[in-house]
Amino acid sequence: MNDLATLDVTNADQLAALYSTMDQGPTLARARINKDSSVEVGEELVDVPSPSIALSHPEYGEVFGKNTYFRVFLDTMQTSVFDPDQEKFTNISQHFKKFSDTALDWHGGDKCGWIPSKEKDKLRGIDPVAYANATKVKLYRHIFGLIKMDDPVIAGSKEKVKIEDVPFRMKLGPSNFMEVSKVMGGMIKQQYMPLNFDMKVSFKLEKRGSNKWFVLKYQPMLTKMHPLTDESKEYITSFVDLVKKENEQVATKMRENSSSAIEDDFSDIIDGD
């Protein structure tokens, strides 16, 4: 991500590079897909729109919107390994924009050992252990931008709120990894910068066996162009700085793990004496 340090937000080619084919804390809202028609508020179940986008808003709490629009200013990729037994991540990589980029992880590896599906499938019959390890690594896409909701609903409240051009981030899992990048890539080919246009979000139900999940679809709203303003440039700078900060956090964790490993090695030598 070193190229982000010299980003010129007035340069169209450099802005296009933000869209890859590739914790700020309470001030940045976080979005996720909600598939439940009711959620717990205190000890009660309350009705919410479903399917919808759930937004953890720094002021309003959990807000749900069925008719939602994204303006994406930046997207990145990241890999991680989650241990369900420990219920925690055991490895996380830095953000990256291209698969050819090196993205250091907590243990000093590249992208937590992630490999493309075709290469992974080849390991199935050749090296079952390597295959099992490779399947634990998940690839995600992060999008950063502004979100708008028509008729948003606060869970358990009748308060009317306005969700318009709220800075947000969203982590998209493997089943939602490709679509947003494909749509933005198509926009750029037509010389429409994604940050200048809303994309209306819709939901498609997918099913495999007993498993059901929603895939997000995006419709660019090209009839209304949002100009690049000083405020937009500030958002871009903030998002880029956030990614750089999280990359440095990964590097710090890697250095800590490396120091611990060295200390353990010396401890073994001393104990051996």
Image (cartoon, rainbow, N blue to C red):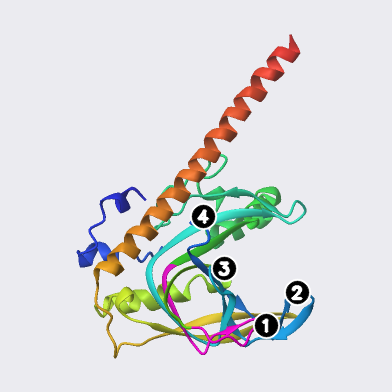
Q: N-terminal of the two: label 1 or label 3?
A: 1
Q: Which residue is mark 2?
A: 42
Q: N-terminal of the two: label 2 or label 3?
A: 2
Disc 3 secondary structure class: helix
Residue visible at 61% across and 60% down?
121
Pointer 3 local density, CA inside 10 Å: few below 14, some 14–19, many at least 20: few
Q: Which residue is mark 1?
A: 156
Residue 166's x, y, as percent? 43, 74
User: For the residues marked 2 and 3, what is the alpha-carbon distance in whole angstroms?
Assistant: 32 Å
Q: Nearer the viewer, residue 148 or 272?
A: 148
Pointer 4 local density, CA inside 10 Å: few below 14, some 14–19, many at least 20: few
Q: Which residue is mark 3?
A: 174
Residue 120's x, y, as percent? 59, 57
Q: Residue furthest front?
A: 159
User: What label does residue 167 carry, if any?
Assistant: none
Pointer 2 local density, CA inside 10 Å: few below 14, some 14–19, many at least 20: few
Q: N-terminal of the two: label 1 or label 4?
A: 4
Residue 80 relative to residue 3: left or right: right
The reply to whether callout 1 and callout 2 are in contact (CB within 8 Å) is yes
User: For the residues marked 4 and 3, what is the alpha-carbon distance in whole angstroms?
Assistant: 22 Å
Q: Amino acid at mark 2?
A: Gly
Disc 4 secondary structure class: loop
Disc 2 secondary structure class: loop
Q: Which residue is mark 4?
A: 23
Q: Amino acid at mark 1?
A: Gly
Magenta span covers which residues? 144-161
Disc 1 secondary structure class: loop
Q: Residue furthest top?
A: 273
Q: Amino acid at mark 4?
A: Asp
